[in-house]
């Protein structure tokens, strides 16, 4: 069993919060203590966005110490804890079961949750993560195996005394899976009705953000009008934009990873080209000027220059509250992509071109964005083809006539 460091009863912790301006997380929360065995001073610290968050982090460390856990254990990231305790968590499992579990851990759990301390992982965080896996169209068995390995690792954390309750024991995810499947069958239902609605949403999100940061609205407009994922918008660089033909070559996306956000290839692993429509060309030109001449400079960043993710956009703009007030309770950040693809389809873009813009691997996925009337027309064509095929079916020929000589 992996050794879990403990704090001898009575060890005194000293805490402080230091404000360091011009940093991404300016409030540094720190906890220090003397190790009675080594007689050395130890400490752990972490940067936070606000003094309230820093004090909450310190309180978590204090509560862990009262339970006999060292601050270094209380702040252990899920990725580190899993790496240390995986063999113990997966004990008694057959090899054929271990392989998909380990794959789920490496490919999905660690990128999504690995950067979070074990004690800070909540039911809500896991619920949202599972929904994202479902929305990314992972199969049922894949999601099931991924949840299973997460449950086992978190259960080991319960036994080690790091947490009291296993937050990974989610229920009802099968219903969420069914709901996601239904939505994917009719993505048009998730789209905003038109440009006015999109502009209203962008302005409303800016109005409630800290400092009324205009960049949040620009991200929303750009994502919808290019039918792109928020992570792809975050990964866009100045050099990816062709202002002569007004085309964006989508090459990368920003995704969660251990230690923070990273850039990697697009979901389909291939670059694709997307048109930049006239309505957002002034916005794009302004962003290019602001970013400077470096072709690797990011087109869109947060107010402090950091990478953007769908979670960052949601929290910074109070997304859920805003969309509810506007009457779009269903609307998620990914639905900006559904909006763009629906608009392209309604504008008459041919399905094979729409597929390239979307980066879909399957033509069937793209066809879901076509207007229902188009489906009726194509169905009529299929019916006619079936009718003609029946007419072409070979018939029995009459017996040959033999002429006597």
Image: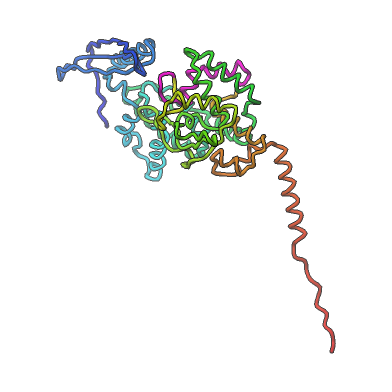
Residue 321 covered by magenta stretch: yes
Whether residue 127 is visible, yes or no, is no
Question: In the rendered image, which quarter contains the N terminus?
Answer: top left
- Toward which corner of the image does residue 113 lie, by quadrant? top left
Residue 49 covered by magenta stretch: no
The answer to which of 35 and 14 lies nearer the viewer is: 14
Q: Residue 194, image x and y in percent?
A: 65, 26
Compared with residue 270, is residue 228 higher up or lower down, i.e. above or below? above
Q: Is residue 293 left or right of residue 193?
A: left
- What segment carries the magenta color? 303-328
Q: Residue 47, image x and y in percent?
A: 33, 17
The residue under the point 54% across, 34% down is 246
The residue under the point 62% across, 36% down is 185
- Toward which corner of the image does residue 391 lie, by quadrant? bottom right
Q: Residue 53, image x and y in percent?
A: 38, 13
| Furthest residue toward front | 244
* Coloring applied to the structure: rainbow
The residue under the point 53% across, 29% down is 172
Whether residue 333 is visible, yes or no, is yes
The answer to which of 347 and 355 lies nearer the viewer is: 347
Question: In the rendered image, which quarter contains the C terminus?
Answer: bottom right
């Amino acid at each position: 069993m992996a050794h879990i460091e403990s704090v001898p009863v009575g060890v005194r912790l000293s805490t402080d919060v230091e404000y360091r301006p011009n940093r991404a997380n300016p409030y540094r929360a720190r906890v220090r203590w003397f190790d009675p065995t080594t007689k050395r001073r130890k400490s752990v610290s972490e940067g936070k966005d606000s003094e309230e968050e820093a004090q909450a982090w310190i309180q978590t460390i204090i509560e862990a110490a009262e339970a006999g856990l060292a601050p270094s254990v209380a702040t252990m990231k899920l990725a580190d804890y899993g790496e240390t305790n995986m063999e113990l968590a997966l004990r008694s499992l057959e090899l054929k079961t271990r392989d998909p579990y380990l794959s789920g851990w490496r490919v999905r759990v660690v990128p999504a949750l690995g950067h979070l301390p074990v004690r800070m992982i909540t039911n809500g965080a896991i619920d949202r993560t599972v929904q994202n896996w479902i929305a990314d169209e992972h199969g049922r068995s894949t999601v099931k195996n991924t949840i299973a390995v997460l449950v086992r690792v978190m259960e080991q954390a319960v036994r080690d005394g790091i947490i009291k309750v296993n937050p990974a024991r989610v229920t009802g995810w099968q219903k969420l899976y069914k709901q996601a499947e239904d939505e994917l069958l009719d993505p048009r239902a998730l789209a905003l009705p038109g440009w006015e609605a999109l502009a209203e949403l962008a302005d409303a999100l800016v109005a409630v953000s800290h400092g009324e940061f205009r960049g949040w609205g620009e991200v929303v407009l750009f994502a919808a009008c290019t039918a792109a994922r928020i992570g792809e918008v975050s990964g866009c660089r100045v050099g990816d934009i062709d202002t002569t033909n007004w085309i964006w070559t989508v090459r990368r996306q920003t995704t969660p990873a251990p230690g923070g956000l990273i850039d990697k290839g697009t979901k389909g692993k291939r670059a694709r080209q997307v048109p930049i429509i006239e309505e957002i060309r002034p916005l794009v030109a302004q962003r290019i000027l602001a970013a400077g001449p470096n072709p690797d400079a990011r087109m869109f960043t947060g107010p402090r220059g950091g990478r953007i993710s769908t979670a960052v956009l949601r929290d910074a703009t109070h997304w859920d509250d805003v969309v509810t007030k506007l009457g779009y309770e269903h609307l998620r950040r990914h639905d900006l992509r559904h909006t763009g693809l629906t608009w392209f389809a309604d504008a008459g873009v041919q399905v094979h071109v729409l597929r390239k813009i979307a980066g879909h691997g399957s033509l069937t996925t793209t066809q879901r964005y076509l207007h229902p009337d188009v489906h009726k027309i194509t169905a009529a064509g299929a019916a006619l083809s079936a009718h003609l095929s029946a007419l072409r079916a070979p018939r029995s020929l009459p017996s040959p006539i033999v002429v006597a000589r």
